Image: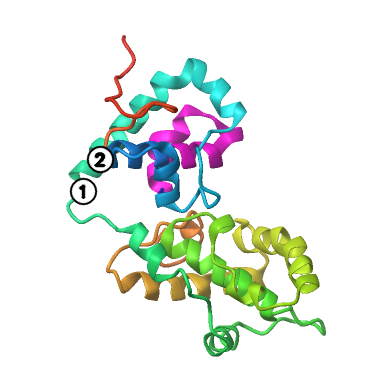
Amino acid sequence: MEERWYQEHLAPLQIDAEVKSVRRLAAVLLVQQASGRAQGDAADFLGINPAGGQFVATGTLLRWLRDGQDALSAALHDLAEELDRATDPTNYQRRREVLRSWSLSPEIWNEIITRLPPVPGPVRPNLDDRVRQEASAFVWVYVTGGEPLFAPRHVEAEQRPEVRQVWRERRANTWFQLSRPDALNHYTALRRLLCQHGELLSRRSNRAPACPFARFCPLRRRRPVAPGDAGGRPRRPSP
């Protein structure tokens, strides 16, 4: 789900504690309505249900939906109307397929990091394969609009089990540094270069990227159904 779609249609619902769950559920409901799939199949199509089976919203979101179902349906109705009017929509599922086996190669990574400005002082930032993996995931998110959790991790998969465990433990901190609005100069420069590379990949399909981090980069500043339903046309709340 593009960041603009979320900010314009779903953020006003003010389910701040459940942003990730709301984005997932909204995307699933839109695909379900457009395709007639079950929610689990719609989630699998979106790549957010890798284990298969039934897709279920979080308990906190389900409790909110007891009173907020009509508001969510109205918001998704407006979003579906906007998508119906789009004349040249982006195929994000195709992008995910194209990048399924992709990662930044050592050659491309070296080209990127050699363009970073020098860091003052004797301490040099870490730019090893672990960071290359997180940078690959960042670019994947930029191009596909997906979540970091579902990004391919081919560089990590090549490592020994104990190394993979260390990488997983450090993943959150690296992502925080890359995505924070007030990132340190080194990470700001790296993020800019990664966004530029993501833009190059995006141009192959002639579409704008959907990454929620795109606002930090200098390059750019079907009707839904109710959760748990198999289909049906949502209604706006009665006045």
Residue 146 percent across, percent down from the top left: 47, 55
Residue 106 percent across, percent down from the top left: 58, 87
- Which residue does the image show at 51% across and 16% down from the upper left? 66
Magenta-colored stretch includes residue 172: no
How busy is the neighbourhood of tag 1: few (under 14 within 10 Å), some, or many (20 plus)? few
- Which residue does the image show at 64% across and 73% down from the upper left? 157
Residue 65 percent across, percent down from the top left: 50, 22
Kind of residue at disc 2? Glu
- Predominant SS of the magenta segment: helix
In the picture of the structure, the residue carrying the numbered disc 1 is 86
How busy is the neighbourhood of tag 2: few (under 14 within 10 Å), some, or many (20 plus)? few
Query: Please, what secondary structure does the residue beneath circle 1 have?
Result: loop
Residue 99: image quadrant is bottom left
Which residue is at the front of the view, 216 or 236?
A: 236
Magenta-colored stretch includes residue 13: yes
**CB of mark 1 within 8 Å of CB of mark 2?**
yes
Q: Quadrant of the C terminus?
A: top left
Kind of residue at disc 1? Ala
Furthest residue toward front:
53
Residue 86 percent across, percent down from the top left: 21, 48
Furthest residue toward top:
239
Mark-to-mark CA distance, 1 and 2 = 7 Å
Residue 65 in the image: above or below residue 124: above
In the picture of the structure, the residue carrying the numbered disc 2 is 82
What range of the chain is rendered magenta? 3-26
Which residue is at the front of the view, 30 or 220?
A: 30
